[in-house]
Amino acid sequence: MTSLTQTSQWQHLQSLAQSLDGQHMRDWFKQDTNRAARYNAKACGIELDYSKNLINDEILKALFSLAQARQVSTKRDAMFAGDIINHTEGRAVLHTALRNFSGSPVMVDGQDVMPEVLATQDKIQRFVKQIHSGEHKGYTGKAIKHIVSIGIGGSFLGPKIMFEALKPYWHQGIKLHFVANVDGCHIQDVLANLDHEDTLIVMSSKSFTTQETLQNTLTAKAWFLNAGGSQQDIAKHFICVSSNIKAAVDFGMDENNIFPMWDWVGGRYSLWSAIGLPIALGLGYENYRQLLEGAFAMDQHFNEAPPEQNLPMLMALLGVWYANFFAAQSHVLLPYYHYLRGFPAYVQQLDMESNGKSVAGDAEQVNYATGPVIWGSEGTNGQHSFHQLIHQGQVLIPADFMLPLHVPNQDDTHHAMLASNCFGQTQALMQGKTYEEAYAELEGKGLSEQKRHSLASHKTMPGNKPSNTLLFQQLDPKTLGSLVALYEHKVFVQGAIWGVNSFDQWGVELGKVLGNNILAKLTDSSAALDFDASTNALISRFREANPN
Ligand SMILES: O=P(O)(O)OC[C@H]1O[C@H](O)[C@H](O)[C@@H](O)[C@@H]1O
């Protein structure tokens, strides 16, 4: 395949980007009263207003043709069909099978995976019922009231953030707690307030080798035993989710308490597997199923909608447009909904772990930007801090604003203020404020000409800053499922265009290995230090402070 930057589609986009010099979105809105209606797409309860972007019909057409040249739809079909597209790990990529309600088989290595998927969903449903009905009791006969979910990365962010986002749908009587970090402060704080007799620990680790999760589970086990539980009571209080059944059994997990998952589910795509069990426990099975159904609806939309209506395709191409033709190095996510405040952190793993790569195809070192830095937090809070940089800084930061149009049981005054701020920010970013407007506002303030000029210069806002606005009728489980799948597919399309493998994470793996090597030197103070001088010195400082 021709190197991406040498393709005619890429070069055409480069010249289109240059042709925008001196143009302003503000003028485009004045010239074309239909712009907002034209650059709008809806699917699965999500409405995307992408009119406040640096695009016109010709640019969109050129972006679609780049997607076509990079065979995005062929690659998409290969993913859904269970081909081994994660070629560096030799695995299929089938999180979509976990929410496949079509009734059709999904084949991996000639075998339909759907019977196992459905059997695991049944097991989750039965277990949730047993906990909620009080049929599954702790060892002293108390019903389970607290669930502690232990996991990290994809085995943490999905369950935690989706559960948090669906607060209006929480099952009464069950409280969920999440522990990820190996920093002992976290698990100590969580366990300190719990009664071991009515607590269930859900350990989630696809690989069953992750240091943080293994250690936190051992700490929870010691807590349980110290509090009065015995070894044979553990089965009533500890369950796990893993694809490594053998390691889980060796660790002491009761085989009946293991919820399986498979190597064709990537960690950051795993909330649809049994890794989502804490969500089901926290929301009830029907709500959890709605989440999966929403994702399935987005899968169908992604597969079937034409590019100009296809939400993942549009959002992905807009991201490529800014990253590769305007040198935008980051992308900010701004949910105007308190319960969705964790979403930027969720997409951070999804996007940055997937597309933070430098090699395309077999072994081609890329010479173009790949995955951007993803960041953000809930609105309106950011307006009073980092939005300044987005408005007037020297870097281009495309933004995704998100707002539910309706929030159950919310004070209307608050909601209208929230919405007005959200819309006001997108407007300010787009239109900015001209020097002439700022200068005119300073009339009659008794300023010298020089002061008035100086202040007007500082108050000028360039505008022309791109943003998407995503509106939801209401952020119910189904819409949230669609929203997550939208970002998954956006990341997929971008990875397909850049030619990277979006499904491995060798950088993260290296960190794990080096961390374990160092741990051996920290725990054995007599071990010779044979790393680089800086690392050796850091280890020595730690040993001095913690003599054993
Ligand atoms: O579920 P586990 O095997 O414990 O893995 C937890 C996390 O570990 C790694 O750091 C990976 O980069 C993540 O993608 C994964 O979600």
Image: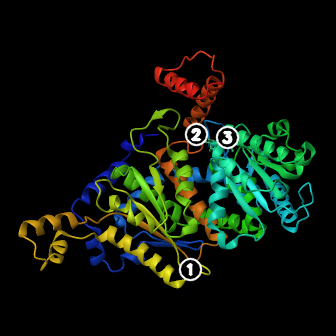
Quarter of the figure with the C terminus? top right
* Mark 3 Cβ and ligand 1 under 8 Å apart: yes
Which label sits in the foreground, 3 or 2? 3
* Mark 2 Cβ and ligand 1 under 8 Å apart: yes
Residue shown at 75% from the left, 49% from the top: 107
Residue at which label 3 appears: 212
As drawn, the residue found furthest toward the left would be 449
Amino acid type for the residue under numbered disc 1: His
Task: Give me the disc on residue 505.
Answer: 2
The Cα–Cα distance between marks 3 and 1, rounded to whole angstroms, is 39 Å
Neighbours of disc 1 within 10 Å: few (<14), some (14-19), many (20+)? some
View quadrant of ligand 1: top right
Q: Is residue 547 above or below residue 97?
A: above
Q: Position of residue 176 (x, y in %)?
A: 72, 60
Q: In the visual, does 365 lie left or right of 226?
A: left
Q: Position of residue 547 (x, y in %)?
A: 62, 25
Amino acid type for the residue under numbered disc 3: Glu
Instruction: Say if mark 1 contacts mark 2, CB within 8 Å.
Output: no
Q: Position of residue 129 (x, y in %)?
A: 85, 65
Neighbours of disc 3 within 10 Å: few (<14), some (14-19), many (20+)? some
Q: Earlier in the sequence, mark 3 or mark 2?
A: 3
Q: Earlier in the sequence, mark 1 or mark 2?
A: 1
Where disc 1 sits, the SS reads loop
As drawn, the residue found furthest toward the bottom would be 412
Residue shown at 78% from the left, 66% from the top: 285
Residue at which label 1 appears: 406
The image quadrant that residue 277 belongs to is: bottom right
Which label sits in the foreground, 1 or 2? 1
Where disc 3 sits, the SS reads helix
Q: Earlier in the sequence, mark 3 or mark 1?
A: 3
Q: In the visual, does 42 lie left or right of 329?
A: right
